[in-house]
Amino acid sequence: MINNSKKQSKVLKLALFATGISGIVAEYILSTLASYFIGNAILQFTLIVSIMLFSMGLGARLSKSFDKQHIISGFIFTELILSLLVSFVAIICYLLYGISEKSWIFIYLFSVVIGLLIGLEIPLAMRINDKFESLEHNISNILEYDYYGSLIGGLFFAFIGLPYLGLTYTPFILGLINFCASFWLFQVLKHEIKPKTRKIIYWTYTLLAIVLLVGVLLAKPLIKYGEQAKYKDKVVYEKQTRYQKIVMTQWMDNFSLYINGNQQLSSFDEYLYHEPMVHPIMTISKYHQNILVLGGGDGCLVREILKHDNISNITLVDLDPEMTILGKSHPLLLQLNNSALNDNRIKIVNQDAFQFVEQTKELYDVIFVDLPDPNSVDLNKLYTKEFYKLTLKKLSKEGLFITQSGSPYYATKAFYCIKKTMESAGFKTFPLHNQVLTLGEWGWMIGSRNKILKDDFQNLNINTQNLKWLNKESLSQISSFGKPLVDTSGIVVNTIFKPTLYTYYKAGNWNLF
């Protein structure tokens, strides 16, 4: 009898261990989905985790309503519902996102329900285990196994689930773990459940097993359908990496690249972005031997840089190795970037741009920053005074710096915040802008130690032989600005400890585009 009690207690703890794994991964899946569909990763992770913890409290309160006769069956059914929801949460969110603009509501709703179920089963497990162990051992052991499961779940999601299985199959792996652990527990404790209820649970397990199997078989096409519904053009490539969701769409002979749902370029007009960013600053620069590119994993910026002479080395730093692999190998990108990333002068480093600049001992003649917009706190650090101070130190004596700076018209305050922040770090700034048909009016900020005069810029002798759009006449256009569309007098400097830029960016007039 004692050995049997130990076995029952052990299996119960293993079920809680499985719950810990699936619960924490459910949090990460929902946070990742919210980041992808809504944006602002740090905010979404904060909200999802907070909502789920609050809901766990509600679940714990709800557990008091279960009488002693129903705590085992209640625990089993809670585990089954949790297995079902965890398995299908990604598919449902993708499908809803494809058909509704209010799909973000369902992500938060899932957070509430899953959190409530997790909060419900922990007190129920303690009450079941109460007859096997004394109070002090019961509480500590139940929580211990649940927390250990959370660690394993987090490691699994970070290093195996998201990078290798993606959001298509990771939820089913976790749902299956929870399903198997609860079924084992049911087999051990079924003699304590009424025969009629026991029969219902058997049929429920059978039905759920069928549903999970069908879900696994249909997961990929269903998610692909939901993904496709989000884009007006045909999706020809999609991959969820450890860092972001990469999607490529195609219409006739043109294709577009998206990261986390935000368009990065279109082959139709990407030269209207890359040519103004590269050729003026490369013409101004006296030296081209050592060049640093932060971002630009698609290879188009490097393609333009390689049109200039006397280039010895280009170091391209992009956080996501999947993006640079795509830039080096995907047929559509190879055709667009002229296989630029396969040039033997290119050194690719997959590392955080801030860390790389902080750690490198080299000096660069030109530094290009072609990173996503500062629409979240995590990207905000790459547009801060601290970051610009670091880049200034890494420039050679007459080196030049340029960063993409969002839109001077759709996010005016953000654009001028970057200008003011660069100046606070010691740069003399020179702003540029151009109309990119598929992106709207876009801007860049040149940084230098010596002031660049507007007349000198507009009289640059640019070699336009291999260019599609940029010429001498256009230099006047891209360097001329009217008055800012909003009052910019109160704009403050963006720093790591006071991240104001992303709030300016979010408050922009993006609805006008």
Image: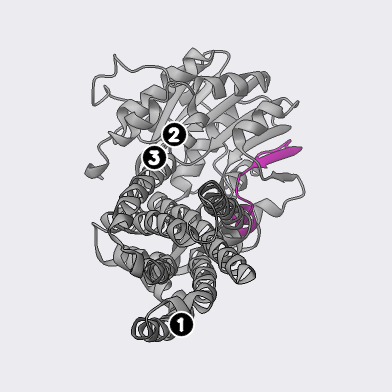
Residue pointed to by mark 2: 377
> Which of the two labelled residues, at mark 3 and mark 1, occupies the earlier sequence position?
3
| Along the viewing direction, whichever of 172 and 494 lies nearer the viewer | 172
Q: Nearer the viewer, residue 20 or 278?
A: 20
Mark 2, Cα crowd under 10 Å, few <14 / some 14-19 / many 20+, is: some
Q: Earlier in the sequence, mark 2 or mark 3?
A: 3
Residue under label 3:
43
- Within the magenta stretch, is there residue 325? yes
Q: Are marks 1 and 2 in contact (CB under 8 Å)?
A: no
Measured as percent of width and height from the top left, residue 72 is found at: 41, 69
Are dots 2 and 3 in contact, CB under 8 Å? yes
Q: Amino acid at mark 2?
A: Val
Q: How far is disc 2 from disc 3 in space, using C-alphas?
A: 8 Å
Tell me the kind of residue under disc 1: Ala
| Marked residue nearer the N-terminal end (1 or 2) | 1
Horizontal side, residue 462 vs residue 500: left or right = right
From the image, state whether disc 2 or disc 3 is nearer to you: 3
The reply to whether residue 266 is visible in this rendering is: no
Q: Tell me how the rendering is colored.
A: one colour
Chain part drawn in magenta: 308-327
Label 1 sits on residue: 209
The residue sitting at 49% across, 63% down in the picture is 167
Q: Residue at x 28, y 24 (%)?
A: 482
Taking the image as shown, residue 443 lies to the left or right of residue 297, namely left
Q: Which quarter of the rendered picture does the N terminus lie within?
A: bottom right
Q: Nearer the viewer, mark 1 or mark 2?
A: 1
Q: As shown in the figure, which amino acid type bears the numbered disc 3?
A: Leu
Locate residue 255: give its quadrant: bottom left
Q: CA distance from mark 1 to mark 2?
A: 42 Å
Q: Is residue 256 above or below residue 85?
A: above
